[in-house]
Image (spheres, coloured by chain):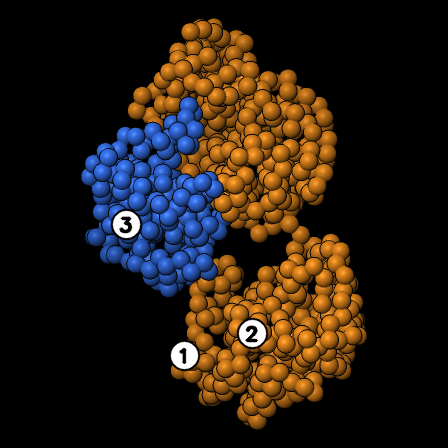
């Protein structure tokens, strides 16, 4: 059992989920599987072709401003498109989505502000509550603070191996204004 | 005096001197109360003698609450360039601090001032610092005022780093006025020692110049810094009036690279005399050449070339980017179409289309080989012959002969292979069970590696024998075989059946390993339905019980731990757990399994 626990909630308010039941976007394992016989561009076109026409129009309108970035093969834009296509392909959208730690931690490692901002933008367009999963809690919060990324009132989830034991990290969470969740029993 | 009970309150603790001083005092077992404005600072790891106190020297009421009784105070808080804030922090701040100290039996206040207060034509920093000295000296509290010359040393902050950053921005080095003004640069660790000594000594109510033992001119200072950073740039003397105009023009920036006080301070003499204090304290300090050499050594970064910008190359680049002692200098891939995307990710480093070109044009210490298996040998052989440390993603070679040939090079360089499962806590714990015979002797074991990836013909290098060396046994199989090597070693006899089902390489393997006293059953398949995530399971039956080990391939700390250990093994010249020897033993099991099993083609 995977336990998502709000760091500042009382224990009886702990929410229990299976790790597999968390709605993690984008699903990079699926993309990696598809990429063994398709290129990135082919995957995008394949995913668009599977959408109903109304969603294709919505997707196109949402991404008109990103044409230049798409043309330049911008990484942050590529991830946004991939994530957005995943959201559009779902019949019923969820109220909470967890952003894949591989994407979040890549943004932290390379200090890619645009990538995090694009994900926040998606949460605003599709009206869901964003939770960033990260194995680098402290670095993530530092990065957002130093880059001027507003994560106030947004969620941040971190595995129990990085459990907050140091008052300094608790202070960082309070100061950043995020809602922190701890993921227990994950690998 | 019991040194462990001595409390020291440090303001400006997140600044350049502050960080060094807090760490120094903690090393000396003092109890440190470090005043920081926000939790976002690079200060220190957790230490039981450190109390991070959040506040600001401009907040009188907060200071009253957080300053402990019977402590020493080191005031490093200062604002250097902002006109209003300089008055607020440097003048009003010191008034607040002194008021908060009343009635707290403060042992001594060490005020860190500046040489700039001695210059004739003063800027805002010098004026406010002078005023703060006057306020302290009239306070009636025990105090010592230190006026350091230029303070330098390793770190990401401070005037020295600011100068270095400016070097990188400009095509030449501007030195204001004639560059002959002299100063006594002091190594930051020496300043920390001076502060400690001044604190615990009986000296009181006095003002001292602080500096290193050698006098140098600004021209000499910049020449030395150019040498330290291996830069070949020309020094050009610029009239100070032009410098002042530039400083005023850029003063609106949040952290301007040049401020009026820098120019005023570097163009007027201060007649610094650090020797009376050094003599009184009996402290030997470093000369500038010694200090700058130490700074260079501490700031030296290991330079890395990442070869292959696919999934694994990017993964290692992202982890290595977070290490402060590492610099990604070169990104190598023969597909230039990738460059734009990789650059947009934020990866640092210059792009090259071959390792040969990268080694010619960039200074590289370590080569990370993250390319398809068939290229590993050639790249590793080249890198080793170029005297570079090498990290190869698993498997090390296409054939066991290739791994043997790399071993035969008998290099003293560090060669690591990316068997990251070895660094997972689960398997480390399992190893200790086996080694320590916690559950007795092994009676048998079964091991499986399951993945749902191949359900039809597949294209790409990973699905061809001549480019990948095999199928499930060669990728992802090496993970399982590395754990078998770790826990049980090399089997005496091997038999089994290896099958092609969908692709032109092995999709499934059923093996039996004979260890003499016990047997092991091994099963690998990458054509398992409902296994989207790679799953490894090992069950070991011991004489006193059974150990079940399961692992799913989700991103864990293993890659981080692997890269950290590899970099540390190079820095400290210690063995790396998954060396080329380990890879040879692991891959020998794989190749023996191929040669001793029945192979069924499609």
In this structure image, what is the colour of chain A?
Answer: blue
**Quarter of the rendering occupied by the C terminus of chain B:** top left
Label 2: chain?
Answer: B
Residue pointed to by mark 2: B251
Mark 1 closeness class: few <14, some 14–19, many ≥20 residues within 10 Å: some
Residue pointed to by mark 1: B62
Mark 2 closeness class: few <14, some 14–19, many ≥20 residues within 10 Å: some
Element type where label 3 sits in the image: helix
Report the mark closest to the observer, 1 or 2.
Answer: 2
Q: Residue at x 59, y 17 (%)?
A: B399
Gap in angstroms between the C-alphas marked 2 and 3:
39 Å
Chain letter matching colour orange: B
- Lateral position of residue B413 relative to residue B542, left or right: right
Q: Residue at x 53, y 44 (%)?
A: B343
Element type where label 2 sits in the image: loop
Residue pointed to by mark 3: A125
Asked where in the image residue B386 lies, by quadrant, the reply is top right
Q: Which numbered disc flags the more N-terminal residue, 1 or 2?
A: 1
């Amino acid at each position: 059992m995977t336990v998502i626990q709000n760091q500042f909630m009382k224990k009886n308010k702990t929410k229990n989920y299976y790790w597999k039941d968390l709605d993690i976007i984008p699903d990079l394992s699926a993309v990696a599987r598809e990429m063994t016989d398709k290129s990135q561009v082919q995957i995008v076109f394949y995913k668009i072709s599977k959408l109903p026409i109304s969603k294709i129009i919505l997707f196109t309108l949402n991404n008109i401003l990103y044409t230049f970035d798409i043309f330049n093969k911008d990484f942050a834009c590529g991830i946004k498109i991939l994530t957005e296509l995943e959201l559009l392909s779902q019949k019923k959208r969820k109220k909470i989505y967890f952003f894949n730690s591989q994407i979040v931690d890549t943004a932290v490692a390379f200090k890619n502000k645009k990538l995090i901002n694009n994900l926040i933008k998606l949460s605003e367009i599709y009206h869901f509550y964003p939770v960033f999963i990260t194995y680098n809690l402290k670095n993530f919060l530092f990065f957002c603070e130093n880059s001027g990324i507003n994560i106030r009132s947004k969620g941040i989830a971190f595995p129990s191996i990085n459990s907050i034991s140091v008052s300094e990290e608790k202070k960082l969470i309070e100061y950043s204004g995020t809602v922190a969740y701890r993921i227990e029993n994950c690998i | 005096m019991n040194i462990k009970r001595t409390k020291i309150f440090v303001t400006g603790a997140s600044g350049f001197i502050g960080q060094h001083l807090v760490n120094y005092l903690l090393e000396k077992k003092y109890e440190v109360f470090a005043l920081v404005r926000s939790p976002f600072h690079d200060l220190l790891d957790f230490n039981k003698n450190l109390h991070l106190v959040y506040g600001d020297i401009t907040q009188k009421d907060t200071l009253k609450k957080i300053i402990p009784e019977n402590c020493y105070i080191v005031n490093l808080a200062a604002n250097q360039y902002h006109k209003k804030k300089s008055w607020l922090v440097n003048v009003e701040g010191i008034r607040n601090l002194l008021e908060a100290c009343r009635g707290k039996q403060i042992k001594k206040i060490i005020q860190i001032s500046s040489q700039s207060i001695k210059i004739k034509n003063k800027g805002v920093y010098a004026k406010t610092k002078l005023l703060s000295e006057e306020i302290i000296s009239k306070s009636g509290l025990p105090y010592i005022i230190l006026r350091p010359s230029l303070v330098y040393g390793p770190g990401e902050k401070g005037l020295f780093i600011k100068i270095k950053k400016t070097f990188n921005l400009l095509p030449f080095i501007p030195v204001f006025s004639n560059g002959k003004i002299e100063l006594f640069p002091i190594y930051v660790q020496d300043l920390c020692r001076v502060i400690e000594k001044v604190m615990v000594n009986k000296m009181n109510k006095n003002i001292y110049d602080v500096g290193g033992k050698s006098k140098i001119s600004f021209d000499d200072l910049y020449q030395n810094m150019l040498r330290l950073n291996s830069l070949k740039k020309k020094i050009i003397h610029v009239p100070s009036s032009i410098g002042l105009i530039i400083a005023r023009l850029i003063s609106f920036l949040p952290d301007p690279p040049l401020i009026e006080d820098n120019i005023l301070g570097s163009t007027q003499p201060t007649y610094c005399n650090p020797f009376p204090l050094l003599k009184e304290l009996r402290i030997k300090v470093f000369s500038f050449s010694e200090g700058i050499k130490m700074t260079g050594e501490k700031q030296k970064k290991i330079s890395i070339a990442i070869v292959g910008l696919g999934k694994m190359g990017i993964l290692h680049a992202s982890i290595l980017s977070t290490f402060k002692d590492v610099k990604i200098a070169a990104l190598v891939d023969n597909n230039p179409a990738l460059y734009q995307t990789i650059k947009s990710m934020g990866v640092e480093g210059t792009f090259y289309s071959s390792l040969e070109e990268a080694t010619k044009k960039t200074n590289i210490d370590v080569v990370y080989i993250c390319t398809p298996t068939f290229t590993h040998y050639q790249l590793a052989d080249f890198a080793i012959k170029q005297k570079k440390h090498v990290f190869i993603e698993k498997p090390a070679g296409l054939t066991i002969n290739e791994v043997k040939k790399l071993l035969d090079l008998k290099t003293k360089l560090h060669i690591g292979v990316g068997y990251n499962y070895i660094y997972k806590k689960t398997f480390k714990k399992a190893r200790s069970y086996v080694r320590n015979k916690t559950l007795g002797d092994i009676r048998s074991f079964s091991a499986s590696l399951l993945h749902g990836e191949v359900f039809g013909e597949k294209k790409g290098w990973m699905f061809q024998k001549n480019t990948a060396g095999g199928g499930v046994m060669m990728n992802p199989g090496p993970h399982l075989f590395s754990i078998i090597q770790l826990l049980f070693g090399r089997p005496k006899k091997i038999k089994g059946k290896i099958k092609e089902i969908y692709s032109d390489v092995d999709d499934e393997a059923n093996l039996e390993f004979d260890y003499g006293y016990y047997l092991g059953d091994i099963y690998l398949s990458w054509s398992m339905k409902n296994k989207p995530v790679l799953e490894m399971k090992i069950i070991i039956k011991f004489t006193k019980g059974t150990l079940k080990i399961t692992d799913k391939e989700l991103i864990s700390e293993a890659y981080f731990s692997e890269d950290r250990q590899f970099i540390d093994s190079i820095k400290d010249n210690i063995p790396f757990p998954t060396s080329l020897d380990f890879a040879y033993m692991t891959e020998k099991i794989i190749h023996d399994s191929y040669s001793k099993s029945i192979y069924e083609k499609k």
